Image: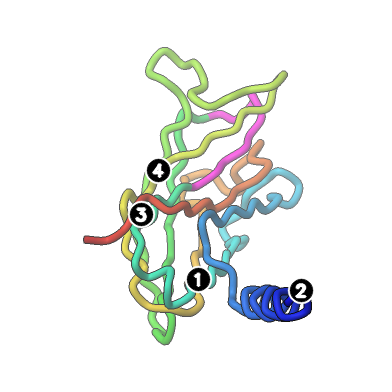
Amino acid sequence: MNRLFLATAGLLLLAAACKPPKMDTYEKNLEIPGHEWTYDYKPSFEVKIQPEDTAYLYNIYVNVRHTDAYPYSNIWLVVGTQTPGDSTVKEQRVELPLAETSGKWAGSGLDDIYEHRVFIQQRAILNKPGIYKFTFEQNMRQNPLPHVMNVGLRIEKAGTRQ
């Protein structure tokens, strides 16, 4: 009886280990070379959505990390999104507010470094399984854009689709 239990438990563990993990949260941040973001540096992020993950809604954020010397209260980005099996990239220009109207940085800070997590899409539907590719291009007038240390993507589950 004990051997049968162990064999069954072992098979269940093996079966569970073979399933691809569900995506609850994806987060990746990339360093901006020299902390000066040029037009030609376009960080990209690939997110794998499993078939069972298409039943959920997702909140999508851009992470930005900069020094106190960053000269603007916002940053404009062109966000490119390529869905699985699609050769075209959908681009959208978005503004990321980084400071309050008083001039105080809106993100969390430690010494002279500030981090922001800014919504770019709430309750997004990722309805195709496969690899989604997101690309960020700085779209400010200044090139290179100084004092930007990192940029990143965060995607987290926001509930089930109805």
Q: Residue furthest left?
A: 162
Please, what is the three-letter code of the amino acid marked with disc 4? Phe
* Residue drawn at 40 percent across, 75 percent down: 89
Please, what is the three-letter code of the amino acid marked with disc 2? Asn
Residue labelled with disc 2: 2
Q: Residue furthest top?
A: 102
Question: SS at mark 1?
Answer: strand
Residue labelled with disc 4: 119
Q: Main secondary structure of the magenta part?
A: strand
The number of discs equals: 4
Q: Measure the C-alpha gap from mark 2 to mark 1.
A: 49 Å
Question: SS at mark 4?
Answer: strand
Instruction: Give the x, y percent position of residue 63.
Output: 55, 44
Which comes before the other along the chain, label 2 or label 4?
A: 2
Could you tell whether 121 is left or right of 42 in the image? Answer: left
The circle on residue 133 is 1
Which comes before the other along the chain, label 4 or label 3?
A: 3
User: Please, is residue 133 above or below residue 73 in the view?
Assistant: below
Question: SS at mark 3?
Answer: strand
Colour pattern: rainbow
Which comes before the other along the chain, label 2 or label 1?
A: 2
* Residue drawn at 67 percent across, 53 percent down: 30
Which comes before the other along the chain, label 3 or label 2?
A: 2
Q: Are dots 4 and 3 in contact, CB under 8 Å? A: no
Q: Measure the C-alpha gap from mark 4 to mark 3.
A: 13 Å
**Quadrant position of the N terminus in the picture:** bottom right
Could you tell whether 142 is left or right of 6 in the image? Answer: left
The one nearer the camera, 82 or 73, is: 82
